[in-house]
Amino acid sequence: MTFSPLPCWKHLSPEAYRERVGKMGLEIEEEAAAKRKRTGAEPFGAAKILAQAPSTRPERVKKSPAPLLHAASKAVRQVFYEGFALFVAAHRTAAEKLQRGDPNPGFPLGCFPPALPFVGG
């Protein structure tokens, strides 16, 4: 099987690419080992995984709803939520100006103004 380099690392030489991928793999292993040490959890291992029935459901299922937006962290998600709230507020203000007859109400970039009422002639 042949793997293509990640687009962000396409400029790297094959050796530098392998080095970065190897380093990333080691970092992932170290983080997982540190987490196992903190929590006391142990990996299943191949025998236990193969012994499971494929139709078995997990003992605990996460019940929380998925976020409206996936982001790298809760803080970043909050920034997006706040930005969207500002966008909605600007759109509503512009829509009210348009309704009052303002010919250039200043809608935010990337939005569609509401449809104007039909005027029969």
Image (cartoon, grey):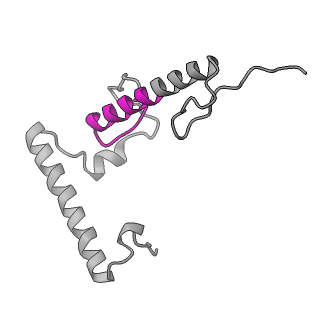
Residue at position x 59%, y 32% from top? 104
Task: Tell me which corner region of the image, top left, top right, bottom left or bottom right, holds residue 42.
Answer: top left
Q: Is residue 7 shown above or below 84?
A: below
Residue 66 seen from this side: no
Which of the two residues, 94 or 43, is positioned nearer the viewer here?
94
> Which corner quadrant of the image does residue 5 belong to?
bottom left
Of 119 and 84, the residue lying toward us: 119
Determine the residue located farthest toward the right in the rendered image.
Answer: 121
Residue 117 placement, left or right of 82: right
Residue 74 drawn in magenta: yes
Q: Which residues are magenta?
A: 66-87
Could one spot residue 9 in this view of the protein?
yes
Q: Is residue 103 left or right of residue 58?
A: right
Who's the residue at 14% across and 44% down the image?
Answer: 35
Question: For the point 35% across and 29% down, which residue is it?
Answer: 82
Residue 40, percent from left and from top: 11, 38
